[in-house]
Image: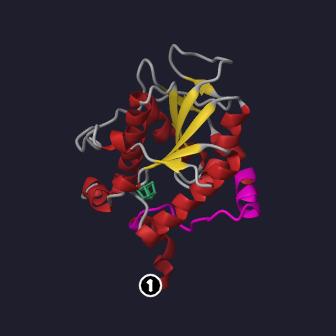
Amino acid sequence: MRLAFAFSSLSSSFPLFARQTRYPLQTRSNTLKLSFTGKAGPSKKMKRILLHICCGPCSITTLKTLLGQGHEITGLFYNPNIHPLTEYVKRRDGCLAVAEKLGIKVIVKDNEYNPQDWFRDIAYRENNRCFHCYARRLERTSQIAKKGGFDFFSTTLLYSKYQKHDDIASLGRDLESEKTKFLYHDFREGWQEGIKISKEWEIYRQQYCGCLYSENERYQKELGK
Ligand code: SF4
């Protein structure tokens, strides 16, 4: 059974990412324990969390951590940065396979898979592309979380050792609101376990970050340069 469903009614409610927006990076100390920012503070009460998911392997120990704390998790697969489309489908299906195993619902934004729009955002700022790529995905996640009345939003990007962890945390904090906070946790502590389980579960494991730039970097040796 596929647990995915779409919040299609939400898709037209928000302008996708303000291109000119700049997010000031704030320096805050990272903590290894789960930290709820803002006035909501740590709570033992179950919270509703919208978790942006970039792929299956990154979601395994992230979800296990949050579910283990008794929270209600809804996943969000919104990743217009994954190219080409066939690669997007593989990662989406990997995400859904993990979600099914762990019994969570996932909002799938196939109707917002628009690489052209993503490339326009990145054009002429390719050297800082990851920051804008994170911002687009986190902004959409925070919009849906606020609209849906979630207590928190977060992202599996915080699991990857290859991403700019502090940039992601700062962006998330800048996007939180009084009612919908950003949930920060250093999910990288589950890195090895996530790899191990993804292999056991035969979840699709990608070979590059996502965009064509990263694919080019991964395989440029094929050009004999
Ligand atoms: S390398 Fe990854 S995070 Fe950076 S722009 Fe490409 S897909 Fe986004």
Q: Quadrant of residue 64?
A: top right
- Ligand 1 is located in which of the four quadrants? bottom left
Label 1 CB sits under 8 Å from any ligand 1 atom: no
Q: Nearer the viewer, residue 4 or 141?
A: 4
Q: How is the image coloured?
A: secondary structure
Q: In the orientation shown, which residue stands out farthest toward the top?
A: 39
Mark 1 belongs to which amino acid?
Answer: Leu
Residue 152 lies, with reference to residue 193, above or below; the image says above
Looking at the image, which residue is at 43% across and 54% down?
A: 79
Q: Nearer the viewer, residue 104 or 163?
A: 104
x, y percent for residue 75 = 54, 43
x, y percent for residue 56 = 60, 55
x, y percent for residue 22 = 29, 37
Residue 84 lies, with reference to residue 166, above or below; the image says below
Looking at the image, which residue is at 64% across and 41% down?
A: 187
Instruction: Let me know if residue 108 is in the magenta part.
Output: no
> Does 162 sit left or right of 201 as displayed?
left
Q: Which residues are magenta?
A: 193-212
Q: In the orientation shown, which residue stands out farthest toward the front?
A: 1
> Does 212 sit left or right of 102 as displayed?
left
Q: Quadrant of residue 97?
A: bottom right
Looking at the image, which residue is at 47% across and 29% down?
A: 27
* SS assignment at label 1: helix
